[in-house]
Image (cartoon, rainbow, N blue to C red):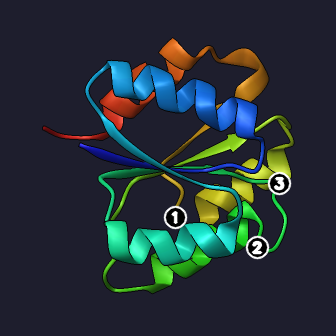
Amino acid sequence: MKILIIEDDTAISKLYSVELMTKGYTVEICSNGEEGYTKALTYLPDLILCDIMMPVLNGIETLKKIRANETTKNIPMLMLTNFGQENLVKEAFNNGATDYILKYQSTPAEVTEKVKQHVTS
């Protein structure tokens, strides 16, 4: 199973990446939404973990672009945020987010469990 992490905080993306790889996932990491969108088109992951607050292209805009593309529109996307702001979560769901994760409340193991819930073997 292939996972794409789009996250501008390298410490967080490495934490999630290591945890996912120890559970048998193949992981690619991108540090902004534009790079993540381009990678999604070529890597075709089984699931995308996408930060909401990022430079270049934020997570909501990245989500919209991925959902608008025929090739990537059905890839499950879990939105990562440090902000529990209802408006961002609601906007993410309105634009096709599969689920969201509050980074400050979730350990890497819990993130992996959430990933497992949304990918089929």
Is residue 83 something that shows in the picture?
yes
Look at the picture and state if 12 lies above or below 49. above
Foreground mark, 3 or 1, reads 3
- Camera-nearest residue between 63 and 15: 15
Foreground mark, 1 or 2, reads 2
Q: Residue at 46% across / 20% down in the picture?
A: 19
Q: Quadrant of the N terminus?
A: top left
Which residue is denoted by mark 2 in the rendering?
57
Which residue is denoted by mark 1 in the rendering?
96
The reply, left or right, for residue 40 in relation to residue 87 is left
- Camera-nearest residue between 8 and 84: 8
Query: In the picture, residue 62 is in which quadrant?
Result: bottom right
Which residue is denoted by mark 3 in the rendering?
53
Q: If you read the primary sequence from the N terminus, does the residue marked by circle 3 or circle 1 appear first? A: 3
Q: Secondary structure at mark 3?
A: loop
Q: Secondary structure at mark 2?
A: loop
Q: Residue at 35% across / 75% down in the picture?
A: 42
- Camera-nearest residue between 81 and 2: 2
